[in-house]
Image: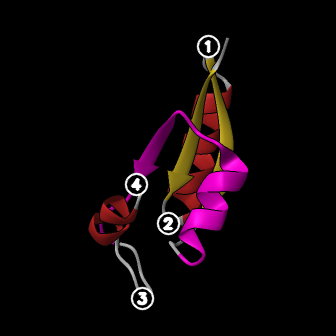
């Protein structure tokens, strides 16, 4: 059984690199990679992750620290 990971990272190069690294690692699968916390709950529900990698300095109305408190 794979560990499902969701990524919240605004830097597209880093987000894509993490996505590829996770999917290329045995026992892990990236179920979602998002640039911000807009519609946070919908994104988390659709990705259904076991683990969330959250950038704490995200743009927009909610940063990563605030988002962690919402979940």
Dot 3 crowding, Cα within 10 Å, few <14, some 14–19, many 20+? few
Mark positioned earlier in the residue sequence (1 or 4): 1
Mark positioned earlier in the residue sequence (2 or 4): 2
SS label for mark 4: strand
Q: CA distance from mark 3 to mark 2?
A: 17 Å
Query: Where is residue 58, by image quadrant?
Result: bottom left
User: From the viewer's perspective, is the residue at label 2 or at label 4 nearer?
Assistant: 4
SS label for mark 1: loop
Instruction: Kindly indicate whether the residue at mark 4 contacts the one at mark 1 (C-beta within 8 angstroms).
Output: no
Which numbered dot is residue 27?
1
Per the image, the residue denoted by label 2 is 11
| The stretch drawn in magenta includes residue 53 | yes
Dot 1 crowding, Cα within 10 Å, few <14, some 14–19, many 20+? few
Q: CA distance from mark 2 to mark 4?
A: 12 Å
Per the image, the residue denoted by label 4 is 54
Q: CA distance from mark 4 to mark 3?
A: 15 Å
Query: Where is residue 21, by image quadrant?
Result: top right
Residue drawn at (68%, 48%) of the image: 47
Per the image, the residue denoted by label 3 is 61
Mark positioned earlier in the residue sequence (3 or 1): 1
């Amino acid at each position: 059984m794979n560990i499902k990971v969701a990524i919240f990272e605004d830097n597209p190069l880093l987000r894509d690199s993490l996505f590829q690294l996770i999917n290329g690692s045995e026992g892990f699968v990236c179920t979602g990679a998002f640039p911000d916390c807009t519609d946070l709950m919908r994104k988390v529900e659709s990705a259904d992750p076991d683990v969330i990698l959250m950038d704490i300095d995200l743009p927009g109305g909610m940063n990563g620290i605030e988002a962690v408190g919402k979940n």
